[in-house]
Amino acid sequence: MKRTTAGSALLLLGLALNLAGQTKSVTLQKIDLSLLPRVQLYLTVTDEKGRSMLGLTDQEILVGLDGQPQKILALKSALSEGQALSVVLVIDRSGSMAQAIAEVRRAAVDFVRRLSLQDEAAVISFDDAVALEADFSRDRGLVEQAIEGIALGRDTALFDAVQAGLDELRGSGSPRQAVVILSDGKDNRSRRTQAEVLAEADSRSVPLFTIGLGPGIDEAGLKELAVRTGGGFFKAAAPKDLWRLYQTIAEQLTNQYLLSFDLQAGRDEKWHSLEVTLQAPAGGGASTAKSFIASLGPGVSRGTLERLEKTVKTADLIRTALLGGAAGLLPGILALLLVGLARRGQRLPLGASLALLLCFVLLGAILGTILTIGG
């Protein structure tokens, strides 16, 4: 009995320390610029215990753009505005999941049941290969059946599975999208890299929610997938924790806010710095920041890309020309030495020496520029 009491005390102490270390959080999942000059933000706000903070107004939420406060036109629940959610469940079925698969199925099915009637879900499983278990559907029974039918496999092609989830979302017309990923190991089979899937998710404003199960996970990698895309990382010490974590993610997605304001500059195709702040009366607020280019559509316009590419190309030309010129100094110095030997120790006049060196420097710069243009 003493051991049980001591164990319980340690568990409660651990939970208390964990909660004490948490703070309020504002997470920006999507910046929608399709209606410029109207800007629409999809965000979640959570308290110290990770629970969604509901009923917030423009008195508690502040928006700043390029250091200037903005007038919030609307701050509402995305769900109440009829904004359906499209979510892809990406589930690890590698051989190491054998002891956890029953809890995984139970937690994933519960997640689907917590979605609203207008939401749709798809299911992807992966081991060393990726399988689409269920295409997008609002039929809960069909999706749940697909989850229950996931069979165990072998290795872990995590990033390929995330990419498959992003590809699946291309067929969805919903403005609210997310991928929820569960894995108990490290990627060892993917053709795609973490950087590639991160870049695509970020450019399309798709938040990735990651759940790492057990001690063998790539915690840093899963955290980066989540933080960079406006999702969230959750760590499950044991399979029994999965139900609670899936519940938390479902709650956060269901309780997303839709905030709108007008960008006075309109479609200027320039970078802007955005900051969203939770202002708490008793302190303990939170904020998040992100930069974006004011261009129509989910990405960047062709004209903006062309200007950015031209800037990068110009920088490359300058850099390679300087490097080529520096490289030309060495043969120039060698040429001076050879000329000196040929003249039996008689030095060239200073002007002629500088002219010879300059010729080699220019030749190196020209060669470097030609190679850059040719590449």
Image: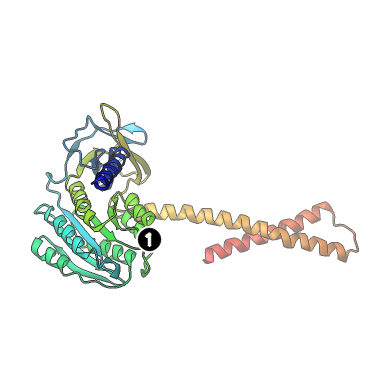
| Residue 306 percent across, percent down from the top left | 41, 55
Q: Is residue 137 left or right of residue 204?
A: left
Crowding at dot 1, Cα within 10 Å, few <14 / some 14-19 / many 20+, comes out as: some
For the question of whether residue 235 can be seen, the reply is: yes
The answer to which quarter of the image holds residue 89 is bottom left
The tally of labels here is 1
Residue at 82% in and 52% down: 350
When asked about the image quadrant of residue 71, the answer is top left
Residue drawn 37% across and 44% down?
A: 270
Classify residue 306 as left or right of residue 238. Answer: right
Task: Indicate whether 9 appears above or below 184.
Answer: above
Residue extending farthest front: 1
Front-most of residues 103 and 178? 103
Relative to 296, residue 139 above or below? below
What residue does disc 1 label? 194
Residue occupying the point 10% across, 54% down: 118
Identify the colour scheme used: rainbow
Query: In the rendered view, would you say 73 is above or below 311?
Result: above
Indicate left or right for 373 with 192 as reference: right
Q: Secondary structure at mark 1?
A: helix
Residue 116 on image: x %, y %: 11, 52
Q: Amino acid at mark 1?
A: Gln
Residue 323, x across and y down, in percent = 62, 57
Based on the displayed image, in which of its 4 quarters is residue 267 positioned? top left
In the foreground, 101 or 51: 101
Q: Position of residue 138 (x, y in %)?
A: 10, 60
Asked if residue 40 shows in the view, the reply is no
Q: Nearer the viewer, residue 113 or 354?
A: 113
